[in-house]
Amino acid sequence: MQIAALVRDAGSATDIDERGRLLRTELANAGLTALRPLLELALAFHHTVTGEHDQADADLARLAELTADGDHAYYADLARFMNPRHPHDPGPDATTWLDDAELVRGRWRALVAGRRYNRAS
């Protein structure tokens, strides 16, 4: 639930980074390693919406490390799709999407654009 709240608040809350750090610690202490990639994707979404590109790159680096074994690797691809610094980088082991990768990329970019628009309103 707390990760869902981060996604809900992405782009508008000022305490996302602190909440993310706390969740990282809680997940590690609880041994819930499978949720770490989802947390990093939520943080990447927030940082991309707010234009914090260095932070979004750091989120992507953590995602790449967490998914290096192939599990949840599509989260890293989704973070690349929404990050303007990696517009067409398929990643080391690009995911095979049911839809065309460009269509998926466009959907994630639209989510970021929509959140930015709502943030500005």
Image (tube, rainbow, N blue to C red):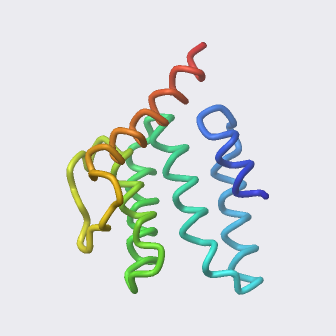
Rendered residue at 59%/35% (across/down): 11
The residue closer to the viewer here, 61 or 42, is: 42
Left or right: 46 with respect to 54?
right
Rendered residue at 66%/62% (across/down): 21
Rendered residue at 71%/52% (across/down): 4
The residue closer to the viewer here, 33 or 111, is: 111
Please tell me whether residue 69 is drawn above or below residue 5 in the rendered image: below
Left or right: 12 with respect to 87?
right
Q: Quadrant of residue 18?
A: bottom right
- Residue furthest toward the front? 98
Left or right: 96 with respect to 43?
left
- Locate residue 33, reporting x and y percent: 62, 81
Q: Quadrant of residue 61?
A: bottom left
* Quadrant, the N terminus: bottom right
Please tell me whether residue 12 is drawn above or below residue 52 in the rendered image: above
- Residue furthest toward the top? 121
- Locate residue 62, reporting x and y percent: 45, 69
Rendered residue at 20%/50% (across/down): 88
Q: How many numbered marks have been drawn onto this rendered protein structure?
A: 0
Please tell me whether residue 25 is drawn above or below residue 83 in the rendered image: below
- Locate residue 93, reporting x and y percent: 26, 74
* Quadrant, the C terminus: top right
The residue closer to the viewer here, 91 or 43, is: 91
- Locate residue 35, reporting x and y percent: 63, 72
The residue closer to the viewer here, 103 or 55, is: 103
